Image: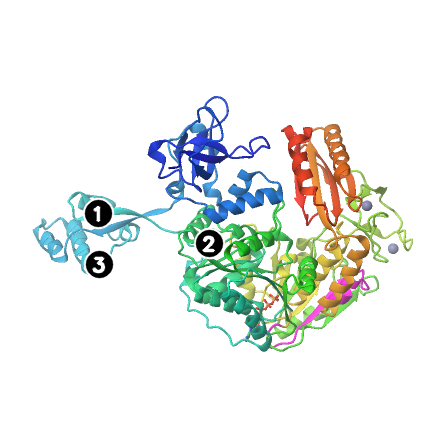
Amino acid sequence: MATVAKVVVDVPTMQTNQPYDYAIPADMVDQAVPGVRVVVSFGKGTREVMGVIVATTDQQDFDGELKPVLRVLDDHPILDAELLALSRWLADDTFAFWITCLQAMLPSALHADTKWLANGAKTVGSRGHVATEDFIVPLLAPDEYTTLAEQQRRNATRRIKLLTALAQWAASHDEPRLHAVVGPDSFDRATVTAGAKQGWLRIESREFYRRPYAQLDAQARTQPLTPTPQQQRALDALIPAITAEQDRTFLLEGVTGSGKTEVYLQAIAATLARGRNALMLIPEIALTPQMVRNVKGRFGADVAVLHSALSDGERFDEWRRIERGEARVVVGARSAAFAPLTNIGLLIMDEEHETSYKQDDAPRYHARDVLQWRGAYNHAPVLLGSATPSLESRARAAKGVYTYLLMPERANQRPLPPVQVVDMRSAQLDSASGDFSTVLLNALRTRLDRHEQSVLMLNRRGFSSFVMCRECGYVAKCPNCDISLTLHLDSHTLRCHYCGHEEAVPTVCPSCGSRRIRYYGTGTEKVEQTLHQILPEARVLRMDVDTTRRKGGHAKILKAFGQHQADILLGTQMIAKGLDFPDVTLVGVINADTSLGLPDFRASERTFQLLTQVSGRAGRADKAGAVIVQTYNPDHYAIQLARHHDYERFFVTEMGIRHRSGYPPYYFTFKLTVSHPEDRLAAKAIYQLAAELKQSLSDQAVMLGPTRGAIARLKRRYYYQIVIKYKKEPQLHETLERLLTTTQVGSRNVFQIAFDREPLSFV
Ligand SMILES: Nc1ncnc2c1ncn2[C@@H]1O[C@H](COP(=O)(O)OP(=O)(O)OP(=O)(O)O)[C@@H](O)[C@H]1O
Ligand SMILES: [Zn+2]
Ligand SMILES: [Zn+2]
């Protein structure tokens, strides 16, 4: 019998990052099992903390008397064996605290609430967050109610009315919601309470789920489409792997509009038919409305949805539906990778190149890695889909590590829309603001005349943080790193975030001598105003962080656009992906360049992806589409190849550049960040780390920095970073782990140290 619980406590420090032994009191043996949350006292004194039991044993590691588990918070494990094992792996892989990983897997409703710990409340548990509702349960037979009604005094009209209703409910086995029947023109609460006292009925409180997509579940199911030949080929490769329960990874590269969604849906159907469940990740909430409708449309209430736009209560309820085995398909954003789904037979990641799959805070995981871990655990294939795969994934497919599936044509057999590149250096501009070329404006006018819709994208990636020459398109780059320099307005300098190189902001273009050098950028709001001036008859919907902050904001805007309540959808890159509106015949990109200026070796990749994705929104149905891209860098290969929808050539070109400059996927990267409220101490710490690292790294590894963080001072802390590029460093993991525990930096709490394996952001 298990007498000892190994508990990971909610005290996220390096010293406490291991399970502690606690005695299981005899009356708790049934509840104190792996995967439940408990309250234990920790350290000196009577401090109570939450913890998670990760294992139980009948032998204790610690000799001496163990403190007991004080309370068990869950009546059954909320993390099963798979998720407990995953948390252990995740902590190791990302260098995060184990408790942080466990927390990341649970909906916030189940996180430790410091308030109840402080107030010393007796119990807390999942029940506290469950929504309940009162129901009326008739307790007698229909004719008994009729008799009772006849026995009432004539003027007891309310009682007679209630008894008559009870007779009906009892006859039809109805147990109505109290809320639905109590009201000004039916019963008052007092009468119902009196009826309960008389033994006529019982008021029963029952759990119910807050269902964010209940109305979608009620809709008629869609039928599978007859696959196109290229979809059939993809399915012919996938379905045998699903059936044979192989943990392989597939890369589905399908041009925009090729019908990847239908492949996902039919692969999910095959998984369900095998009696297994499916997990599907989609990027951020911007995409969810259409994709959720698609998946719900096919599988109805079997689908649970998890993403950050749900309220805590809704997310918790969807999570419980999954945990109880009531949902067989999970669709969600990044953190849904940890959904408590069991018996997984297929894992899908749509738009696999998206950076939002990587978490910026601890645990700094990439959801792709989590899916692959779970695929191996469950013996299930992983399907990565994109029109513009990440270079890492495409390179793995080229090597045969992933199985490569290609869908080069649109499902409707139509060509991809022609892309016209407008050179803004010489273009005729239509308005004083300089945002619109005549070409783009005329195209918008034509669509208005024809009552067709347009999508306008304002690229805000890297917004106004770099310097560009308006005459020749020159962007200031670091002489050492070939990375765009970032503008720091506070110091009026340009800085390289990789190596620390710093120079003054030029007043004259070093390339052409022009004085028209400035930081480039316009906000969506300003463009909207310009549009109102130059196209007053156009109805414009704006979609950006401001207009979508409120819950359901995305869905509302997209719905309105889908119903033709607007002619132009103007937005940031959140409109670039996934939207499928048949009447959009024009896509305009106001400024293609801002993302080229990102201080990141992936700037070209990001620009290519963005332009290809947004171009893909045009001409998806019967009407032919067109794309107009305004740029100051018309000859840049990312823009030229996006213009030709040529992902494959982009891949080869970009791989050549990465090879020459020693970046992923040829090299691995690792970022270390140190921060401290005192600049001097943060700097000292990073140099100390750098020195220790240098000793244990091989000659092949390259260390960039130490350098100041992009935001050198954030929340009163100073940041410094090191980036390591390496091919093979078998000792690295161990070295880093040692650094975490032994260096002064690791042992002092005022220092914060963050490790990021394969960072997607270098700033
Ligand atoms: N087999 C099919 N028969 C008829 N129409 C199809 C078929 N497959 C897909 N379609 C239609 O083609 C259009 C594009 O499909 P879908 O949105 O899945 O493309 P996608 O590959 O996800 O593109 P994107 O990368 O742009 O999101 C949709 O309107 C879809 O209904
Ligand atoms: Zn210039
Ligand atoms: Zn540099």
Tell me the number on the disc at residue 202.
Answer: 1
When asked about the image quadrant of residue 35, the answer is: top left
* Front one among 513 and 22: 22
Tell me the number on the disc at residue 341.
Answer: 2
Q: Quadrant of the N terminus?
A: top left
Q: Quadrant of the C terminus?
A: top right
Q: Classify mark 2: residues with Cα within 10 Å, few (<14), some (14-19) or many (20+).
A: many
The residue that appears at 48% across and 45% down in the rendered structure is 107
* Residue 715 visible in rendering: no
Q: In this view, does 97 lie above or below 426?
A: above
Q: Point out the tag, 3 or 1, that comes first from the N-terminus.
A: 3
Q: What stretch is highlighted in magenta?
A: 620-642
**In this view, the mark in front (1 or 2):** 2
When asked about the image quadrant of residue 227, the answer is: bottom right
Q: Is mark 2 on a helix, strand or loop?
A: loop
- According to the picture, the residue beneath numbered tag 3 turns out to be 173
What amino acid is labelled 1 in the image?
Arg
User: Can you tell me whether the CB of the residue at mark 3 lies under 8 Å from the nearest atom of ligand 1?
Assistant: no
Q: Point out the tag, 3 or 2, that comes first from the N-terminus.
A: 3
Tell me the number on the disc at residue 749.
Answer: none
* Whole-percent x, y for residue 11 in the image: 53, 32
What amino acid is labelled 3 in the image?
His
Asked whether 69 falls inside the magenta stretch, the response is: no
Q: Which residue lies furthest to the right in this view?
A: 513
| Ligand 3 location (quadrant) | top right
User: Can you tell me whether the CB of the residue at mark 1 lies under 8 Å from the nearest atom of ligand 1?
Assistant: no
